[in-house]
Every structure is written in structure tokens, then in C-alpha cells.
Image (cartoon, grey):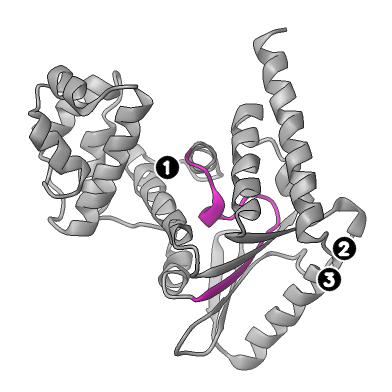
Amino acid sequence: MAIEDNPETRRKYGEELKRRREAASLTQEQLSEVAIISRTHLAHMEAGRRRPNAEDARRLDRALNPGDDFFERFLPALDGKKVAEHFAEALEFEGQATTIRVFGPKIVPGVLQTPAYAREVLNSGSSPKSDEERDRLFVTRLERARILENFDSPVVWVILDEAVLRQHIGGPAVMCEQLRHIVELGESRRVRVHVLPFTVGYHALMEGVVSLMWFKDQPPIAYVEGLKSGRVWETPSVVRECQVAYDQALGDALSHRESLALIRSVAEEYEHATRTDQHP
């Protein structure tokens, strides 16, 4: 097995390798001894400077993923489909946008998902996924979140239906971590968050997922998604209709401060449930 030799692919591989090594509480030196790979070679792989081969991947899997072949599957995974076909065009726009406003009706929008939450979402669904497809989608999901590493751009606003907070995805521990991640982004002023509480009843965005994007040198677009379908709209009248619907829902939502307080409160409920599960 081999991967396309380009810097972006190597960097993604290296980031996941480092994350799993640190999760196992191993230094590079310790992992190099266990995996029988030179520390220098390992450091270059983590930095995205060296291309791993199949033997490297098998050694890393034996050291970090007993019973799993994640790194070996990872090699060709990035050469295949990265997202659902109907989202591919929207993903390209997302990487270029200066402002993004997104609505999450049932699950946390992908750009805000933690790794644990993303894995649970990708492991579920009506259509079973192969390990290879799941890993491709997971890598892309992690990559999408990188746009938040730059504090200034894009500007991100998120409206979440209260159902997003209450829907148990992955259990209390996963939900607690996910909601606290959103609170952290909101408190750091990186993302502006608004929650539509159940008490609002019917609202303008209830019918589906909507993302609005603005750009420096081109007109804004809207992405509207349903079950197994999605479409990017560039027609000015349609984009404007979506913007008006978003603004109406925003008017019904809690303020940023109130929303963070609610999310924090629900996260505490999940934390309490986690402690209860651990100490019945």
C-alpha cells in the first residue's frame, strides 16, 4: 500500500500519528523503541516531512493500535472520496470563506465536532461504512476543524437547535467533552453561538441544514442539505431567501451569553451522569 506523495497528505498522517502517540502517553523515543522505527524517522513522519510506507504503518499499528490496522488503512484512504458527494462542492467553498454561518438542527456541525463525537457520528448512520471509508471521512472531518485555528478568519456563527445538546451521541462523556469544546470556542470569541430552545416551537430553519458563506472576491452562496442530498445555491434570490430565514431564526434564538450558559449547564448534566455511571 502507498499514499500519494504530497505535503498535505503527509501532514494529516503525521498529525494523527502524534495524537495517538500522545494519547498512549509515549514520547517519540519510547514509541521508536516499541515500534522499531528510528526516532528521527518517526519525528519526520509526525512533522509531515517523510512519507510512511506499509511496513512503518504495520509497526505503528502493532505499537499503538493492537487488534486494529488503522495506520495501514490510512495510507490509501486519503486518495479516495473525502466527503459525501453532495457535500464536496460545499467543502471547497468552506475552505475559502471569510464568513460562515451554519445551522445545526440535530447534530453538532462538522467544523465544531470533537474527534470522539465525529467518530460516533461516522460509525452510525443508515448506510454501513467500510473501515476505509470511515477513516477517509474522519480525516476530512478533522481537517475541516483546522479553519478555526486562525482567530481572525473565517468569522463563524452557529445556531444550534436545543435538540443538538440533548441528543445523546456517544454517551455522556462524549457529549460533555463536545459541549465544553463549543463553550470554549464561544468564550474565546472564536465562534459566536446561539441556541434555539425548544420553547420557540416552529422556526424558520426547522426544515433542514443551512450554511451561508461569504467571500472576499465573489458573491455569497448558500448550502442546503437534506437526507442523502445537498445543493450549493449561487442564485442571488435563493441565497437571499436563505439569509432571511437564518436571520429570522437568529432573532428567535438565545443570546450568545445565554446560549453558552445553557450549553455549559447541559455539559454539567452529562458530567454528573458520567460520574454516576462510573460510581453506581
Question: Where residue 151 sits: x, y (%)?
Answer: 49, 63
The answer to if 102 sits in the magenta stretch is: yes
Mark 3: which secondary structure? helix
Single out the mark in the foreground, 2 or 3: 3
Q: Which dot marks residue 251?
A: 3
Q: Are marks 3 and 1 in contact (CB under 8 Å)?
A: no
Q: Is residue 108 left or right of residue 199?
A: left
Determine crowd level at label 1: few under 14, some 14-19, many 20+ residues with C-alpha closer than 10 A.
some
Question: Where residue 65 sits: x, y (%)?
Answer: 30, 24
Q: Residue at x 77, y 63 (%)?
A: 206
Front residue of 212/50: it is: 50
Say what amino acid the circle numbered 3 marks. Gly
Front residue of 244/83: it is: 244
Q: How many numbered discs sit on the rendered protein?
A: 3
Q: Which dot marks residue 146?
A: none
Sequence-first tag of 2 and 3: 2
Residue 191, quarter of picture: bottom right
Determine crowd level at label 2: few under 14, some 14-19, many 20+ residues with C-alpha closer than 10 A.
few
| Residue designated by label 1 | 129
Residues drawn in magenta: 98-115
| Residue designated by label 2 | 202
Question: Where residue 8 sits: x, y (%)?
Answer: 24, 58
